[in-house]
Structures are given as structure tokens and as C-alpha cells.
Image (cartoon, rainbow, N blue to C red):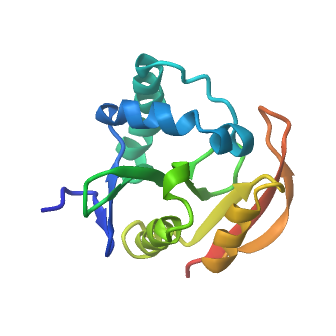
Amino acid sequence: MQKPNTIETERLLLKPATTEDAAFVLELLNTPKWKQFIGDRKVNTIEDAENYITVRFLPQFERLGYGNYVVTRKSDEIKVGSCGIYDRDGLDGVDLGFAFLPEYEKKGYAFEAASSLVESAKKKFNIEKLLAITVAENKSSQNLLTKLGFTYQKLIVEKESNEELMLFDLNLK
């Protein structure tokens, strides 16, 4: 039986991240693609991961009712990735983000999880527009965003890192 705030798809459960997910978050944030395309979050220990979840994820769930979800495969309860709707400083709206462990890429999990979050954004969270950001080198993310119906809008510069990012949006009205 699914818990409140859990989103269920055919093969996956998307559960709000908690400090019990610290080992998984530590692993995910230290994959080569995370560091290359998203950046080094300086999460190097279980304690760092617990703090990251406590400071970055839990307050947004409390405030908005949505945030970062750990994506778990229903068939064997293995945590395969992360997908969420984030309220980020510097963006005029909330954005969709996703990352998966390398061994679970190219299996349709990202599309399945992200599609369910787009649907929840519209029907459950009453969000009228979703944004998404990615670096130009991350062609896989761009392809997934396009497949989800997002449209490229423009290049923006992220304030903290001064990094140039591609901004996409999706109207949910």
C-alpha cells in the first residue's frame, strides 16, 4: 500500500526523500554524470547526505507539498534514481529535475517517473507551468525534456555558479 505523497506508476514508486535515503543520495550525488552535469554538492559522507536532505529537501515538502522524490522500482524495491519538482532561487517558477544511477539509465525509468510528476504537477499540485534547466552538454536530458513536451526557451546564467544553462518550459494549463 502506498503512503500519502507517494506517486505510483506501472513500474515505479516515487516517495518523498527522507534522511533514511541518505546512503542512496550519497551514491547518486557522487556519480560521474551528476558531478559533470549538475555539479559537486560536496556530499561526501552519510552525515553530509542526511544534512543535504534535511536542509534542501524536507523544508520544501513542508512548505509546498512536493519536492524531491526517490524513485524505487516496485518489482524489487531497488532505488534507481531521483525525480522532483524544485523551487530554485533564480528561476521564475518551479522546475522539473531528474537523475538516475548509471545502471538504471536507458530503461525508460526517467521518462516514466518524470511523466508522472508532470501529471501530478498539473492535477495534484495545481502548477500551471513547469520549467527545466540543463547544461548544453547534457543531450540526454534535453531529449527527455523534449519527449515530455518541454520547449527550449533561452540560455540563462545561474547566479551561484555563473554557469550558462538551457531553460525549457512546459505549459500545464
What is the x, y in percent for residue 127?
50, 68
Marker count (numbered): 0
Please identify the quarter of the rendering in which residue 124 is found. bottom left
* Residue occupying image coordinates x 39% and y 76%: 123
Between 102 and 155, the one nearer to me in the picture: 102
159 versus 108 height, above or below: above
Q: Is residue 105 left or right of residue 142?
A: left
144 versus 160 height, above or below: below
What is the x, y in percent for residue 156?
85, 52
136 versus 147 height, above or below: above
Q: Is residue 11 left or right of residue 131?
A: left
Quarter of the figure with the N terminus: bottom left
* Residue occupying image coordinates x 18% and y 56%: 3
Residue 149 shows up from this direction: no
Residue reaching furthest to the left: 1
* Residue occupying image coordinates x 44% and y 22%: 51
165 versus 31 height, above or below: below
Between 168 and 64, the one nearer to me in the picture: 168
What is the x, y in percent for residue 117?
45, 67
Residue reaching furthest to the front: 103
What is the x, y in percent for residue 138?
76, 56
Between 58 and 136, the one nearer to me in the picture: 136
* Residue occupying image coordinates x 64% and y 42%: 34
Between 88 and 12, the one nearer to me in the picture: 12
